[in-house]
Amino acid sequence: MSKQGEKTYFSIVMARLVKNPFAIWGGAAVALLFILAIFAPFICPYDPGVVETRILLQAPNAKHWLGTDELGRDVLSRMIYGARISLMVGIVSIGIATVIGVIVGAISGYYGGWVDELMMRFVDIMLTFPTFFLILAVIAILEPDIMNVMIVIGITGWMGVARLVRAEFLSLKQRDFVVAARSLGQSDFLIIFKHILPNAMAPVLVSATLGIAGAILTESALSFLGIGVQPPTPSWGSILTEGKNYIEFAWWLSVFPGLAILITVLGYNLLGEALRDALDTRLN
Amino acid sequence: MMMPIMVGITIITFAVIHLAPGEPTDRMTDMNPKISAQAKQKMREMYNLDKPLHVQYLLWFKRFVKLDFGTSFSPDNRPVLDKILERLPITIFINVVSLALIFVLSIPLGVISATRPYSLFDKGTTLFVFMGFSTPGFWLSLLMMILFGVKLGWLPISGIRSINFDEFTAWGQVVDYTRHLIMPVLLSSLTSLAFLSRVTRQNMLEVIRQDYVTTARAKGCTENGVMYRHALRNALLPIVTIVGLSVPSLIGGSVIFETIFSIPGMGMLFYESVMSRDYPLVMGVLVIGAVLTLVGNLLADISYAVADPRIRYE
């Protein structure tokens, strides 16, 4: 599509991102999280699970940069492993939500009629539930564990994506390239997934990035309430919960995990906002 | 429009509860060795667990229409509706005050940011906004409790009234009540407050470029008149919708804030019922929560009509 010397859409988007401080800071935070999560075993100064009773609740010091917890475990190491949980919860749950949302939105927007009507009413119904109530109820019934947390956040979070994709499809299906594909006799499946969907992905990417931020917050809140990731697996929310009992004399157990959540979520939010601006075809 | 949604809500709620492995009554009977097989059977009949699923649902729905959610599994055995109703006012009160606060603060914040884009004020607001919706509310609540409640001793950290509440004068009671609610209200509004000021700013930036704003300026309106009478009114429309959409997240958030600040509202009731698997109560709160959202959306639609004459006259 692009001729020699002409800028591709991708290079325009990248150029805009590089110039945006939001993208730089957000991208740096997210990249840091990925590095910590992937290389956790090599970076961690201590084994996150080792109980050391001689060094209970030590304040941050040269040996334990972020202090130790009530069992003498190194907080920094536990938090580095916690990055894995946050990253995984964010990506898997939003992955589930995005797949459901894209399929529902694509079918709804492409076929229209009663299919559309039915699916959008279902979206309306799902949207009236206070999502956090629904998540809490399902997880408590199904036994809290990380798999269930990810699945439930996913299946209660797809409605926004569905609406976005539907709106894109409504306008894209009128376009010439779709009419051309249809007149060539291509199947609906190919038209939806090969021709229209790639053109509808920009807003999905933005909403997924912002969605990951929300999912990480939700997981930490669930872990905080004791029905998210279960001990001894270290998640930022659960480190905070265990630490809150000692908050008056061991502030580091509550302050650092919260900061980690804040920085990560902020990173994804900034990146999402920067992507929204960069992908906007109206600005040139 | 409301009725099919209501039916849908009850179907989803019903489905959620039946995700549970085993029967809802297992929890009640397994814990109690004294219970006989006969009593268990009686209980199964009470909840119609011996009938096929769709019959169970229809029977439950029939009682639901009469606002009868059954009785709680907890030892007090009280009707679910009574338990919810006594906890509802405080939750609604906190959420309404939060909503009012969100409106009153976020709109001026957004308007001022939009009229001075990239100024120091705008940059400061942007920073606040992003921090606002990235901060875990429960974490900030903990830190605030320690700072204002324990270290400085300015505000109480739990409950909604002091132990000696009854000894206060009427005015003293109001003050006491307010002091207890300051932190929960502020903290629960933070996320939506941040989000809404961002949306207001973006909408204002779009509206300001419109021809009718130029016209208003050209005919000699004061700058404030242009901003608040001509521009804001049009920028408000999408904001009203978003406020309506933020009702479920406010209600959902009440679980966290009520649990942290020990406020005896619907959020805490829900948390307790979920932890003890009190299924009738869980179902009741889920449905009531959805009804509150519907009411919120309805109010949003009405205010939409108030703000936009085009809708009123159609």
Image (cartoon, coloured by chain):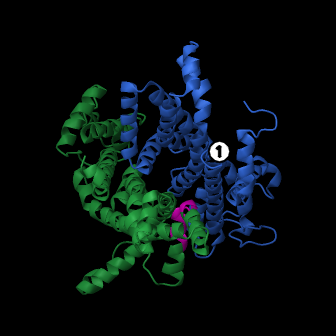
Chain colours: A blue, B green
Q: How crowded is the residue under tag 1: few (<14 C-alpha within 10 Å), some, or many (20+)? A: some
Where is residue B197 drawn, in percent x and y? 48, 64
Query: Which residue occupies the extreme top position in the image?
Result: A185
Residue type at mark 1 is: Met
The residue located at (39%, 64%) in the rendering is B230
The residue located at (45%, 46%) in the rendering is A135
Nearer to me, A76 or B310: B310
Is residue A55 found left or right of B272 in the rendered image?
right
- SS of the residue under disc 1: helix
The residue located at (39%, 66%) in the rendering is B103
Quadrant into which the N terminus of chain B falls: top left
Where is residue A106 drawn, in percent x and y? 50, 30
Nearer to me, A277 or A158: A277
Q: Which residue is mark 1?
A: A88
Query: Which residue occupies the extreme left position in the image?
Result: B66
Taking the magenta stretch, the answer to whether it contains residue A139 is: no
Taking the magenta stretch, the answer to whether it contains residue B135 is: yes
Residues in magenta, as a range? B133-143
Q: Vertical placement of A278 versus A148: above or below? A: below
Mark 1 — on which chain does it sit? A
Where is residue B240 drawn, in percent x and y? 37, 57
Q: What's the magenta bit mostly, secondary-structure-wise?
A: helix
Where is residue A208 drawn, in percent x and y? 59, 44
Q: Vertical placement of A242 versus B81: above or below? A: below
